[in-house]
Image (tube, rainbow, N blue to C red):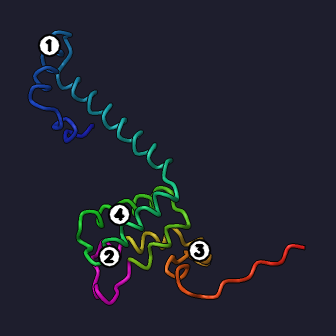
Amino acid sequence: MPSLELALELTPLELVDLQRFAGERGVRFETLISQWVRERIQQEQERQAQEAREWTAQDVQEAIAQLERYKTNIYQPKALQALYKLERIAREKPMPGLRAALPFLRPNWFMLTLPTEYAALRATIEAATAQWKDLPRPAESDDELLDADLPRPVSPPDV
């Protein structure tokens, strides 16, 4: 039986139009609504399946950057949006890059306790990426070090 919650997305005017259409065609209104709801469910499932195929490492990096940006205000809608995005990726298309989010999902000096969503996401990511837990995480270059007055290696002489 299709969900009536989807049928409630119709505006009253759309419902009246559907009722009129059903009367003109000699079709039961409930049958028409049921068919419409089934089509909506199928479209939503297809959309979710399409999104699952399109997750990339870039999506993971963007979500982690957003999580890092709001690490001091974890209740910001954008921080929660990043959490949900990472959770969907972990469930639908796990990839090693998700493990880079783990440091942001631990308590730290400015957030001694984290909301349950953070702990749940941490557990989800750890479970989804267990096969990659022993891989080293790629190091990121630090722009501050590049600007620091440190000795640079000499390039080998041309022979």
Q: How far apart are marks 2 and 4 (CA)?
A: 11 Å
**Of 6 and 80, the residue lying toward us:** 80
Query: Mark 3 or mark 1: which comes first in sequence?
Result: 1
Amino acid under disc 1: Gly
59 is higher (above) or lower (below) than 21: below
Q: Quadrant of residue 21?
A: top left
Q: Distance between the residues labelled 2 and 3?
A: 21 Å
Can you identify the residue that label 2 sits on? 71
Can you identify the residue that label 1 sits on? 23
Q: Distance between the residues labelled 4 and 3?
A: 21 Å
| Residue 124: percent from left, percent from top | 43, 69
Q: Is residue 136 left or right of residue 31?
A: right
The residue under the point 30% across, 34% down is 40
Query: Mark 2 or mark 4: which comes first in sequence?
Result: 2
Q: Is residue 56 magenta?
A: no
Can you identify the residue that label 3 sits on? 138
Judged from the image, the secondary structure of the residue bearing numbered disc 1 is helix
